[in-house]
Amino acid sequence: MSKWYESDKCRGIIISSRVRLARNLKKYNFHNKLTDDDAQKMINDVKNSILDSRTVFGEQFRYVPVNTLSGNEKFAMVERHVISPELMKSTKPCGVLVKDDESISIMLNEEDHIRIQAISAGDNIDEAFDLADKIDNLIEESVEYAFSEKYGYLTSCPTNVGTGLRASYMMHLPELERTGQIRNVIQTISKFGITVRGIYGEGSDAMGSVYQVSNQVTLGQSEREIIDNLKKVAAIIVQREQELQKRVYEASKEDVEDKLWRSYGLLKHARKMQGKEAMQLISNLMEGESMGAAEMPKCSQSLIQLMINIQPASMQINAGRDMTPDERDKYRAEYIRKMLE
Amino acid sequence: MSKWYESDKCRGIIISSRVRLARNLKKYNFHNKLTDDDAQKMINDVKNSILDSRTVFGEQFRYVPVNTLSGNEKFAMVERHVISPELMKSTKPCGVLVKDDESISIMLNEEDHIRIQAISAGDNIDEAFDLADKIDNLIEESVEYAFSEKYGYLTSCPTNVGTGLRASYMMHLPELERTGQIRNVIQTISKFGITVRGIYGEGSDAMGSVYQVSNQVTLGQSEREIIDNLKKVAAIIVQREQELQKRVYEASKEDVEDKLWRSYGLLKHARKMQGKEAMQLISNLMEGESMGAAEMPKCSQSLIQLMINIQPASMQINAGRDMTPDERDKYRAEYIRKMLE
């Protein structure tokens, strides 16, 4: 089963679209006051609602008991965006139901009992919402959600009360970053309730010029309004980034091609490479792709997949062993060399 | 006829060995007071002494009237070390007799009537001296040199009086340069009458970490003493550079290989490249070669030849047209890409 990040659709400014729904079960205490026993019961309730359902999902999902995994295994799931950094750090009973193509994951006992996440490659937020919505309905067939007629879905953190919805785009914004305009963009869109985070969410850096653009407010708006608002803002960001890329490309195609092929030359021949440099160079290739550079180096993976696969834990899982940072830098360079044809 | 710089012998710290003899004819005024008529006569006298000689040299040399050449043609000869920058700039009748492999050139009406230059690939100063000496004897069979029993050969500039000999090594000294030790070396060896210049002699920069190490004093010492003194000093410089290279290589072979292959990656894939960067990157490959890096990128030219061929005038001669600096940067990148396999 190929993963969402292997799709050709993620070769653009919008790499992927994601919808997350926060839900809690009425019959259990919320996260902070949930006993381990009840946590396990709650997990089983939700697991059963999916795995025992007579839908196609019953066979497409598998359950992973996150708190029993090794550090590398957990971290690698974060790197692939399957679970959140918060779930990785949890010491309580917790887990995740993952769809075979990793497009849907249902985190159990994260900050809320249930976090349904659906990811679609490229500019496809409606599809992501539909997927999350289907899962939401399926679970609700067998459990009762904590819901208030006045506020909507109740959640651990007040910022999620209401729809419990966070919609976000993963975007590649190299020129907004390079020109420093990203700072103005962040300021401006915050007025529309939209926030910008790094590649791995809250508090993470924007490695490889990859950003997550998402709604901040979940209360007082319908799901449709939240998504439409995000779409509008995202369209403006994409347009600005495209304009800047076009300007750079038209000012000097040769400089663009030079930067592209120099990045390829380093990626294809270096013997050691730190993550930050690799992300930057891969980002340069992605930008070449967005700009529509006439001639493109060939890579046997989508570039976002390559970005994921050279993260520390994913490499260690792939190699089947723990590595020192220096060993990782060598492994990373070797891995990239193999992937670039 | 392959050129000296195509030899495998120039793949080391000592790239080449050069001897230059300054001579003047007794019957003509020295350079500053030489009329154009007499200059032409003087040139003919020396030309005939070589081209009409019944030796093998008669067929191996060709005469090039330097002051009638185009700027590019002259400049390219400087880039290949066939003539000096001074001869290139001369507006008086002047020329050069060049041997087919460019290992010997006899400049006519430079600062002195005659400047015999012999270059041998690698560490071969004795061979270079023998060659220059043979030419010196051959010319002397048909002309009378300005010579004083007391001072030796008389020359335009007092610094050349005596033997008229300058012996020099072209050396690749990346680690002495990188560590800044080259400055101490220059200071120290100046006490032994040895001076260090850039790749194109007096006043030129040391591009690509290539230096010329030569004797400063020509008076009061025999040819043998001058050459032996230079040899001793050069051996010490080579030893120091080798020690530094060994230390770097042993400290981290991986870092050395990484630097080597990154340099290759840029040289092999860039679409534009300025001369300075290209020289630096080629110098990195040369250093890998000197260090004996296990695996080496392949180049269809010796690296010193590549350094010569990417100089501005040589490229313009090769391309058959004048180019703007920007066009040259593209041509250079393309040329290098072709040469690296």
Image (cartoon, coloured by chain):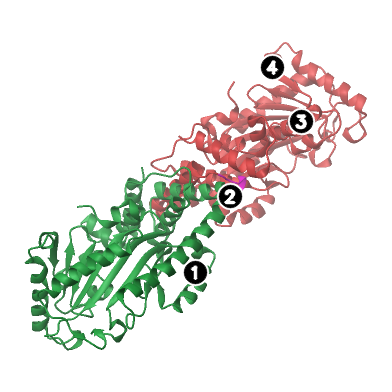
Chain colours: A red, B green
Q: Earlier in the sequence, mark 4 or mark 3?
A: 4
Relative side of A134 to B109, left or right: right
Q: Which mark is nearer the camera, 4 or 3?
A: 3
Relative side of A330 to B174, left or right: right
Instruction: Determine whether the residue tagged by mark 4 lies in a helix, strand or loop.
Output: helix
Which chain hosts label 2? B
Residue B116: quadrant of the picture: bottom left
Residue to which mark 2 is pinned: B252
Q: Are marks 3 and 1 in contact (CB under 8 Å)?
A: no
Relative to A8, is B124 above or below? Answer: below
Distance between the Cα atoms at labels 4 and 3?
27 Å
Distance between the Cα atoms at labels 4 and 2?
53 Å
The answer to whether residue A301 shows anywhere in this view is yes
Q: Mark 1 Cα within 10 Å, few/some/many (few <14, many 20+)?
A: some
Q: Earlier in the sequence, mark 2 or mark 1?
A: 1
Query: Residue B106 in the image: x percent, y percent?
Result: 19, 70
Residue to which mark 4 is pinned: A57
Distance between the Cα atoms at labels 2 and 3?
33 Å
Residue to which mark 1 is pinned: B182
Residue to which mark 3 is pinned: A70
Distance between the Cα atoms at labels 4 and 1?
71 Å
Say whether mark 1 and mark 4 are on the same chain: no
Q: Residue furthest top?
A: A54
Which chain hosts label 3? A
Q: Mark 2 Cα within 10 Å, few/some/many (few <14, many 20+)?
A: few
Q: Are marks 4 and 3 in contact (CB under 8 Å)?
A: no
Identify the amino acid type marked 1.
Answer: Ile
Identify the amino acid type marked 3.
Answer: Ser
